[in-house]
Image (cartoon, rainbow, N blue to C red):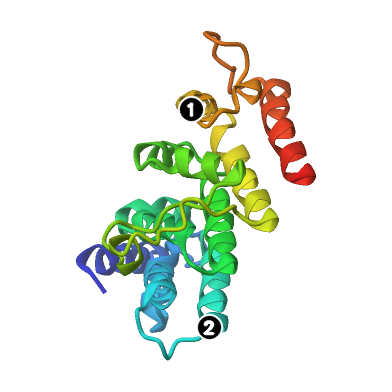
Amino acid sequence: MGDKGLNDLLRWSIENSATGPDGTTNAPPRSTLNQEALAAMMGGPSDADLMRESMAAITSPDPEISLESRLTAFDNFEQLIESLDNANLLSKLGLWTPLLECLAHDEAEMRLMAAWCVGTAVQNNEPSQERLVALGGIEKLVQMAVGKRLPAPSTSAEAINGDNKKDEEETKNVRRKALYALSSAVRNYQPAMDVCAAELRRQGHGENAGEEGKAIDATDMDAVDTVIGGLREKVTNA
């Protein structure tokens, strides 16, 4: 356990063993332990540890790790980041980059899970929305939603050999999950909505990007629904 965890435990122990104003020890606790400190006290891994371990399994180059095991790790990862605190740990732990790289994975199920996790992380979470914009994630989600396969990372063997699948179409299920993530990412966060509209026009889908030269209000849920609904219809009809 780090120094901060030890300090949290010490403070909690002192405050909760002190006598109350009436001389008894039944006074309500004056502080609570965070999950990480509590897990450390109990001898188990913290959520941060579990998040790191899950991502390590997801992205491991070990061919002995099956697709089923990687998908199970992704499912565990998604459940962990349903917590707002854990979602905000993604930046601190350096997990945003490998997560977004999974959007270009060879396996459709892995791409779907990556998009699902992105959507979970950014839902009603401005710091995560901000991070997604900064890392170019909005553009990736737009491209997936309109049916394009993302190119493999430039360091991969596929990209070196020129086989980066950039001309292949994305599957319907992955497109739907990318659209879910995009919907969560742009709501109530104007920078994400602006990037989304710009990328839609760049991809030739300006009819879904609102009136040219006029920003779509990210706080106007009807306006956002119009954008997302138009894209959803295209997925359905694909």
Mark 2: few, some, or many residues within 10 Å (few <14, many ≥20)? few
From the image, tell me which residue sits under label 2. 69
Nearer-the-camera pick, 180 or 161:
161
From the image, tell me which residue sits under label 1. 202
Q: Residue at x 42, y 68 (%)?
A: 51
In the rendered image, the quadrant that contains the N terminus is bottom left
**Amino acid type shown at disc 2:** Ser
- The x and y percentages for residue 60 are 36, 78
Secondary element at image label 1: helix
Q: Residue furthest bottom?
A: 64
59 left or right of 80 in image: left
Answer above or below: position of 220 versus 151. Answer: above
1 vs 2, front mark: 1
Q: Residue furthest left?
A: 3
Q: Quadrant of residue 13?
A: bottom left
Q: Earlier in the sequence, mark 1 or mark 2?
A: 2
Q: Residue at x 72, y 25 (%)?
A: 226
Instruction: State the count of labels.
Output: 2
- Report whether residue 214 is seen: yes
Q: Quadrant of residue 112?
A: bottom right
Mark 1: few, some, or many residues within 10 Å (few <14, many ≥20)? few
119 left or right of 172 in image: left
Answer above or below: position of 118 versus 40. Answer: above
